[in-house]
Image: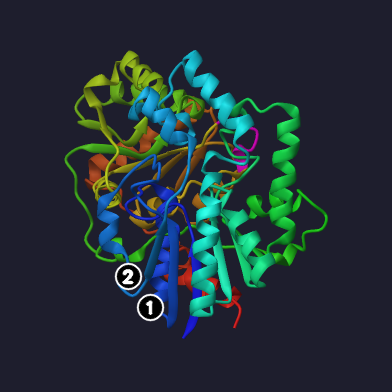
Amino acid sequence: MKKLLIITYYWPPSGGAAVQRWLSFANKLADKNYTVYVLTVDENYATYQLRDESLLKQVNPSIEVYTTKTSEPFKAFTFLFGKKSMPMPAFSNETNASFIKKASRFIRGNFFIPDPRKGWKRFAVKKAVALIQKENIHCVITAGPPHSTHFIGKELKESLDIYWIADFHDLWTDVIYYDMLYHLPIIKRLDKKLERTILETADLIFTVGDKYKEKLLSKSNKIIPDNIKILRIGYEEIFFDHQTAVTLQDQFIITYTGTIANFYQPQVFITALKGVTDKFPEVSFRLRFAGILSGDIKEAIINAGLNSILDDLGYLSHHESILLLENSTVLLLVSPVTKNEEMVIPGKIYEYLAARKPIINITKQGSETASLITNCQAGKTFERNQQRELENYLTALVEQWKVKGTLDIKNNEQLIIEYSRDAITEQLIKTLPN
C-alpha cells in the first residue's frame, strides 16, 4: 500500500470550510489503497475559529491521526480579552473594530510572520520526522492556510529528502483580508520572500482555480508552470446523491451560507430584494444566513425593512448547512470587494452547484465564480451597479416559482460531476508519486 502523510492544522473537531477539503481527500485516499497518516494539532492546544464536532464522525477509521502540542499567541490574547476576542474568518465579527482589535491585527501582521500559528512548527517537525522514519513514508502534503504549515514540509524535505506537496487552498499575501493586518513595508517584503521560498522549493503545488494559479506563477520566474496543479475544492457527493424528487415550497427561501463581512458589500442585493418583496406582498419570503453575518450588514437588512423575513441562524454544522441548501428556493453568493475579487472562489460554490438551485452571484462578471455558474447553467452573476437587472431577475424567479412551486434546475450535469470530490480525488492520485 502507498503511504501518505497529510500535515494540516485544521482537522476535526475544527469546523469551517478549511477542514473539509483534506478530510474528504484523506477519506477517499484511504478507500483507494493508500495508508493515510494525518498530523494535526491537539484540540486542547489549538485555537480554532470554529468547531464542528459532527465532523469527527466522518473520519475514515483506517486513517492514523497523530497530534502534537503547539505554542500560539492567540492563547494569551483570548486569556486576556476572552474567547469572543478570537477573530473570526475575514474578521467578520469585528464591526467597527476597536483600537485594541486594530492593535492586535497590527501585532499579528508584523510580529507573527507568516501567521500566529507558526509556533506549531517545532512540535510538528519532531513528530513528523519520527513518524516518517518509523513508517517509511516518502510523500508529505502540507495544507495551508495557515501557510506556516508549509515550513514544516520544507524542513522535512531538506532533512529527509521526502517528496513534498504544498497545498494553497487559499492565497497567502493576496488573501482577501491581507490589508487589514497593517503590515509595515519591510514586513510585506519579508512575507513575500517567505511565500516565494515555499513556491520555489516544494516539489509540487496544489491550488484551487485558474486565476489562483496565475497569481502564484507571478510570484517568481523560477516556478515551473506544470509544477502547479489545480485541485478544486469540490463537493462531497454523498451529501447530495439522494436528491431525486423536486422540492415544492410554500415559501420563497433565499439562503446564504458561510462568512459575510462588511467588505463583501451586498447592498445591491438588499435593495433589489426589498423592491421584489414590495411587488409580491402575497408571497412569503425568507432570507437566511447560516454562518457569520456582519453586524453592519444585518443592520442594513433591518433598515431596509426586511427584518420580518430575516433569519440569522449563526454557525451551523456542515450537515445542517447542507440541509439548508436543499430546502432553499434560491442561493445567494457574494464575493468580497478586494483588489483580487475576480480570483475568489469560496468553497461553498461547489455545494451550491450540487444543490441544483438557481444561484444569484454578486461579483464581477469576469470572475472565476461567474464562469463556473455560467458554464454549469446554474444562475446569473450581477455586479454591484446592476441593481435594476438583479431586481428584474429576482422578479422573474418569483413569478416562475409561483407557477411551479419550485425552482429546482437541471444544470450542466457532466460538469457538475467533474466537481465532485470523487472525480477530483482521481485527479489528485494522478499527481502523487509512485
Residue placed most toward the observer, 25 or 65: 65
**SS class of the residue under badge 1?**
loop
Q: Quadrant of residue 64?
A: bottom left
Between marks 2 and 1, how big is the CA–CA gap? 8 Å
Residue segment shown in magenta: 337-342
Q: Amino acid at mark 1?
A: Asp
Q: Residue shown at 67%/72% (left/top)? A: 161
- Give residue 352's position: percent from left, percent from top: 39, 50
**In-image side of 182 versus 169 (left or right):** right
Q: Which residue is situated farthest in the right direction here?
A: 221
Question: Do we see residue 378 in this rendering?
Answer: no
Residue placed most toward the observer, 343 or 425: 425
Q: Is residue 338 magenta?
A: yes
Check the picture and name the quadrant holding the C terminus. Answer: bottom right
Q: Is residue 267 magenta?
A: no
Kindly report the secondary structure that dominates the magenta region of the rendered protein: loop
Question: Do we see residue 195 in this rendering?
Answer: yes
- Give residue 353's position: percent from left, percent from top: 41, 54
> Mark number for residue 31?
1
Q: Which residue is situated farthest in the left direction here?
A: 250
Q: Amino acid at mark 2?
A: Asn
- Colouring of the image: rainbow
Q: Residue shown at 65%/40% (left/top)? A: 173
Label 2 with label 1: CB-CB less than 8 Å: yes
**In-image side of 308 versus 176 (left or right):** left
The residue labelled by disc 2 is 60
Q: Residue shown at 19%/49% (left/top)? A: 248
